[in-house]
Image (cartoon, rainbow, N blue to C red):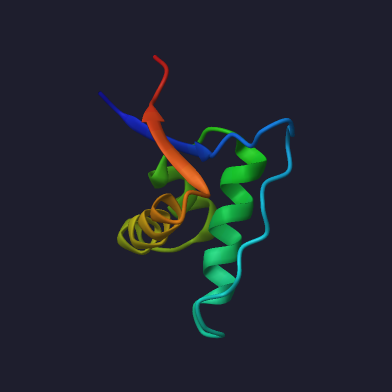
Amino acid sequence: MPRAIRPEPSEGRNGVGPLIPPLSESQRPLRQQVFELVRAAGLIPRVQVAKDLGVSPASVTTITSELIEAGLIEEVAAPR
């Protein structure tokens, strides 16, 4: 089944997720762009994130894995 990612639900709040601290200055911009794109889209496949940002799917997978581990986004089954 295809998988997609979405922002982690926050208690009592809709639409705005938590701000995330940068890992380092060199990683911050792309990590922030990925987070903001997922937050704005609500539900988006990693491949689409990579296309929209013009980066490799491997880069998006690495960054989304970090965001999932941090509890900022979650991976869900994509609707059909």
Q: Residue at x 51, y 37 (%)?
A: 6
Observer-nearest residue: 3 or 48? Answer: 3
Q: In what quadrant of the picture does the N terminus appear? A: top left
Above or below, comparing residue 80 to residue 75 in the picture: above
Residue 5 location, quadrant: top left
Q: Residue at x 67, y 52 (%)?
A: 18
Where residue 67 appears, as percent x and y from the top left, is 46, 55
| Residue lying at the far front of the rendered structure | 11
**In this image, 4 relative to 14: left or right?**
left
Observer-nearest residue: 43 or 72? Answer: 72
**In this image, 22 relative to 49: left or right?**
right
Residue 60 location, quadrant: bottom left
Where residue 61 appears, as percent x and y from the top left, is 34, 55
Total count of labels: 0
**In this image, 48 relative to 36: left or right?**
left
Q: Residue at x 33, y 32 (%)?
A: 3
Q: In what quadrant of the picture does the C terminus appear? A: top left
| Residue lying at the far bottom of the rendered structure | 25
Above or below, comparing residue 49 to residue 77 in the picture: below
**In this image, 42 relative to 60: left or right?**
right
Where residue 31 appears, as percent x and y from the top left, is 52, 66
Above or below, comparing residue 45 to residue 31 in the picture: above
Where residue 69 appears, as percent x and y from the top left, is 39, 54
